[in-house]
Image: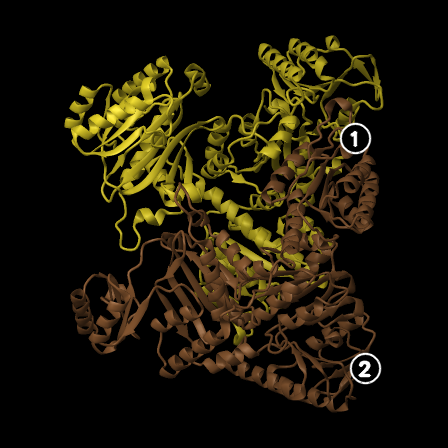
Chain colours: A brown, B yellow
């Protein structure tokens, strides 16, 4: 993809002599940005643009790196094909009017993809403004832009929306950060976020990648990239509710994702989800500093008020404020009037008017205490700008020397701060909250690196997997939904602790099974048409004798008639703490699992935790601990806790089950009853996809 | 207090000819700010400052409005007294070294208050930087400040910390907002936040009041002011955890408040609690616009991406996006290429390049739909700044004409935005999130105006109140804690539904009471030394016969011996849904009540709601609805709900009880058991203050 962002030659398709022509603006922008490569212009009519001839595609030589196409939608396939024939490897299609617009547009877009595949071209767009690589003199936008409007820097931006690319570039430039590369993806017909991310996390000029996404398409790939990347991904994910979805569809043909899944998965992968664009700036600053490796923070504040604010926020954001060491305290004492010293961290520098002492104190702290980060909160009047500059330059250097982030929170008159920022060439934070939030983000990113241990393979595995495959296969053939007793069987094969059961289809079978299981028993109807068993007389509990069993079977058969496939007999189990385990194949992220506390917890408080499957045993335990009602499982008020090992093992196995079979769309274990020792799966249900072949294809792709 | 902020004459005490002298800086600042009144200078030694003589206090004429004192702490009382003798009504004491510093300092500070009371002076500080009123040419800070560093505006700032005053002024000025008045309160020996707020909410030049507080002292007064004010209070409350408290004490002698109470009370009073100083800026912008009166929002966006972002945030922040009316749609159609129109709100203006249409469309919307607010999201390149200015000016005017807030979110290159902001003279928001947050704040403020109906007096009231007073009086005389059966009696007097009970002190009394109450019974010991009855054998449930009762009494008497005061006999009650009701006298905010869901809810999930007492029936219902587990009370899964009227009435009556008797420090009803019809108070406990006289004095003051 280096060729896309650094093309040695470009052809711009869709230029004309008309002053309204948008293609002209692209050409002007390339000229203004000083594009050093060869630029060919193609238009419907011959002519001249700024002294260059307007050609037809046929006139073009071979060996061009990139085509930019901005012509009416209906004409794009032909132009693209012509470019394909000229062996151009990349095309940016800026035109709109495709799937975001109409059914006909969708058809046109499919043609584009087909042409691209045929000629092995890769496409950016359609319905986009393309790319920017300021250091290479590339800006393919069709809005007139001056070079000075785009600051070069080390943050890459990927967005569906061109508007967002433009504004984020403005915002970053305004905050002294700047961009390395940007790409507006539009409808993502071919190349999508994962492709761009894969390239940009290896781009030496990029320190962090910012994404704005209205939909996540190949989410699993994105997440896998994020989990192993040494550079952070900052993602603003919009389109989180139905009102937005309506607009998103007509904007870039984006479909909504399940936002709870997005949240959980991003967190797991160490992707920082941006709640707003200020956070983009704050994190951008944090990732311009040396990497943060822990949560021990030393804070120096010129204002006592902000020392308190900082202590509050350190507490809120989970930073430790270690006491200053004797060496540092000695250093501090030299600058304070001995009588009003207060050596707490945060240190209130209020009575120290000798600003030159700040770098000296901070270096003493860095040397002796090796904190994970330092924060200096420094407010000064205009008259002291020169002194502040000297402090800032020294601290920027110390940050490098000790490879430790030093967050500078400088408060002063606005113009002065901006010129200081430029002179120091080091990020300045606007307030303590911003700095703390930024460090917290860096810390979260750091904490997720190498933390995710891969799940160990299950030992019982191969034979059981094959047996499970056969069960699913035959269910698919019979086209039954949902699976009930088969779901229990699958759980057993994956060594989940299923309560003893039998599937029976006649009275004699039932009575024989009852003898084997032992009374008391629960009886459930197995039928394709009944989902809420208890509502429709399809469930009877606590049957104590053959007589009761016989009557129950008669009564169910009488009510439900032909729709009955059979009956599930289960030994009654003791009450315990109920949890819900779920597995699902998310359309964007693939297999995920869910753990919820049963009863009112899941129902009223939505107390559940989501993870990508498969999960390791460590991750499973972590899921359990993240439940709001975790203390109920641990044991409260003298009640014994439940068997957390059993719960964690069940999660690990369930997660493997949903990974192994892409045809499992949804799997619910509700409930798993947990006891102080052990647990029991009482009920399970599986929905499988109607077109398993398709699912497997998706999985393989 | 107008005299304090607009003094016609000032005496500055503590000036000398030494270049290190801080008093000189105050004088320089007053000169730089063009203070137009008379300025007298007083110092220990005679001399000359900028051609003005340095006097002694004795030299001063009478009739001076304001003294500013900055001398060593030990010398301040004498100077203050001298000022008192000269009948100076206000003094700002900037010196440090008082209660924030040492025990001796605390003693000195007490002297200051005594002197002030004696001479009827009002004090600002000590340990502060005083006031600023830029329009009157007043800045009493001792740090050199240029006039250009402080922008005049309509926001007032009150803070304990001088550093925070300086930085907030910088931040507001940087964002084109500016200040009307500021005051650094320091240790708040005399004047405190409520005094300043009372003045500033009536100051015509102030549109909103910003407070930074490390401690809330006269919280009840502050809240009462906020509830009735037509101008909003924005409060940053720091010092929320022990680590911070340590620093706050040595900074401005501030003690920590219960942060959950602060949160609840602020919310109730419509005080906007700031989580950071960016929110201060955002709310400051919102309150510069015409008042927001509802949540119907019309959004116009030049970027499709931001239209989606805005729809997400509108949903998150509780705004409605009504569909555009036919009249507006007609107006829209004129500017769109007919074929790609999408008339959703937010409207995506992406294909409309005629910016002049924006004010026309927005006026059509204002006229025909009367939305509560409009938002325009407008990104443009540098080349279009002139056009953007014209759009901004027209919309600023429309906002006035239709008295409707129009939030302008302008994105462009940084310098251009700043000059646009100045040229339009109307706030520009940096991003959609900021604008939405700001409108949400305005909406929350609006929603709390006039919503708080005052509680109606209880009808049964006078006689019962007198009886309650006598019970409390005799408990105080006997100095017993906690009150148990007396607590039940008080609940009965305030018509809470107490389960039948009897207090007995002998076997015969117990058996007689048992006959009256009827079996089965619960027996509880009443003793000053036992708090957890069930842990120490002080509680026996479900006694069914006289025989069981007799044995239980013997056994308890045997175990507990002399510490037993008597026994509480209660009729056993049926199980139902348990709630906890609490009352408390908060040191800052006075009487408050708390409602919690019993059992695991309060214990594990901290599910409780706090309000200032007394509460109206409406507020009581609102409290109930705010419980996370409210649906449990309403009834879930076919279970019947509980008697919410009974619950609300109980809250109203409990709140009246804690208000009526300041000596009640804490009152717990745990549990109140609720049924589908009615409810029962099973257990109650009251702690009273050891010095009730003091509490009543506090109450009256």
Q: Is residue B580 above or below residue A75?
A: above
Mark 1 lies on residue: A330
Q: Is residue A275 above or below residue B448?
A: below
Disc 2 chain ID: A
Residue A500 location, x and y as percent? 33, 66
Q: Are marks 1 and 2 on the same chain?
A: yes
Say left or right for A85 vs A253.
right
Determine which quarter of the picture holds residue A493: bottom left
Find out whether the residues at labels 1 and 2 contact each other: C-beta distance under 8 Å. Answer: no
Q: CA distance from mark 1 to mark 2?
A: 72 Å
Q: Is residue B656 above or below residue A183?
A: above
Say left or right for B313 vs A580.
right
Q: Residue at x 35, y 75 (%)?
A: A481
Residue B313 location, x and y as percent? 52, 56
- Residue B209 visible, this orientation: yes
Q: Nearer the viewer, mark 1 or mark 2?
A: 1
Number of numbered discs overlaid on the protein picture = 2
Say left or right for B625 vs A374.
left
- Residue B366 visible, this orientation: no
Mark 2 lies on residue: A52
User: Looking at this view, is A673 or B352 the one in front?
Assistant: A673
């Amino acid at each position: 993809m280096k060729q896309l962002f650094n093309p040695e030659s470009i052809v711009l398709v869709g230029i004309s002599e008309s002053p309204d022509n948008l293609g002209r603006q692209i050409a002007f922008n390339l000229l203004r940005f000083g594009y050093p490569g060869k630029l060919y212009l193609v238009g419907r009519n011959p002519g001249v643009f700024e002294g260059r001839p307007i050609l037809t595609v046929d006139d073009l030589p071979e060996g061009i790196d990139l085509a930019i196409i901005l012509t009416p939608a209906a004409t794009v396939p032909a132009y693209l094909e012509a470019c394909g024939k000229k062996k151009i490897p990349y095309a940016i299609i800026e035109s709109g009017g495709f799937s975001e617009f109409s059914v006909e547009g969708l058809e046109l877009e499919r043609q584009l993809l087909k042409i691209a595949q045929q000629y092995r071209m890769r496409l950016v767009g359609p319905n986009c403004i393309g790319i920017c690589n300021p250091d290479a003199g590339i800006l393919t936008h069709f809005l007139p832009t001056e070079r000075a409007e785009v600051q070069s820097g080390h943050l890459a931006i990927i967005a569906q929306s061109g508007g967002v690319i433009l504004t984020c570039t403005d915002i970053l430039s305004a905050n002294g950060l700047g961009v390395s590369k940007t790409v507006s993806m539009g409808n993502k017909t071919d190349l999508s976020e994962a492709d761009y991310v894969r390239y940009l996390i290896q781009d030496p000029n990029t320190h962090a990648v910012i994404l704005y996404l209205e939909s996540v398409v190949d989410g699993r790939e994105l997440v896998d990239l994020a989990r192993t990347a040494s550079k952070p991904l900052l993602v603003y994910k919009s389109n989180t509710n139905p009102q937005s979805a309506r607009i998103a569809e007509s904007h870039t043909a984006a479909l909504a994702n399940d936002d709870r899944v997005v949240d959980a998965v991003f967190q797991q992968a160490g992707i920082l989800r941006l709640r707003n664009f200020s956070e983009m700036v704050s994190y951008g600053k944090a990732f311009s500093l040396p990497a943060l490796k822990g949560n021990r923070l030393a804070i120096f504040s010129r204002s006592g008020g902000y020392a308190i604010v900082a202590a509050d926020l350190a507490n809120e954001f989970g930073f430790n404020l270690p006491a200053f060491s004797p060496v540092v305290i000695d250093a501090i004492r030299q600058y304070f009037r001995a009588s009003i010293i207060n050596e707490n961290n945060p240190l209130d520098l209020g009575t120290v008017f000798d600003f030159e002492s700040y770098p000296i104190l901070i270096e003493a702290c860095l040397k002796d205490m090796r904190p994970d980060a330092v924060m200096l909160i420094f407010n000064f009047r205009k008259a002291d700008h020169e002194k502040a500059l000297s402090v800032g330059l020294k601290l920027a250097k110390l940050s490098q020397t000790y490879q430790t982030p030093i967050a500078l929170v400088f408060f002063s008159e606005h113009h002065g701060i901006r010129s200081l920022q430029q002179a120091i060439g080091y990020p300045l934070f606007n307030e303590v909250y911003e700095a703390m939030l930024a460090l917290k983000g860096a810390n979260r990113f750091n904490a997720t690196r190498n933390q995710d241990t891969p799940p160990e393979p299950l030992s019982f595995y191969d034979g059981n997997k094959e047996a499970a495959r056969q069960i699913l296969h035959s269910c698919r053939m019979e086209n039954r939904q949902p699976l009930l007793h088969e779901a229990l069987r699958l759980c057993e094969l994956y060594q989940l602790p299923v309560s003893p059961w039998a599937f029976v289809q006649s009275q004699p079978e039932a009575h024989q099974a009852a003898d084997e299981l032992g009374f008391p028993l629960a009886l459930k109807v197995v039928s394709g048409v009944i989902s809420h068993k208890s509502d429709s007389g399809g469930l009877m509990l606590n049957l104590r004798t053959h007589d009761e069993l016989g009557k129950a079977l008669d009564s169910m058969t009488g009510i439900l008639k032909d729709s009955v496939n059979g009956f599930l007999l289960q030994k009654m189990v003791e009450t315990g703490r109920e949890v819900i385990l779920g597995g699902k194949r998310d359309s964007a992220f693939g297999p995920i699992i869910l753990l919820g506390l049963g009863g009112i917890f899941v129902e009223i408080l939505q107390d559940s935790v989501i993870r990508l499957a498969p999960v390791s045993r460590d991750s499973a335990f972590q899921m359990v601990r993240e439940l709001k009602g975790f203390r109920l499982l641990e044991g409260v008020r003298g009640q014994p806790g439940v068997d957390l090992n059993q719960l964690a093992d069940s999660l690990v196995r369930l997660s493997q089950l949903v990974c192994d079979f892409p045809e499992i769309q949804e799997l619910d274990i509700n409930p798993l009853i947990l006891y102080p020792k052990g647990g029991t799966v009482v009920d399970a249900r599986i929905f499988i996809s109607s077109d398993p072949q398709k699912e497997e294809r998706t999985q393989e792709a």
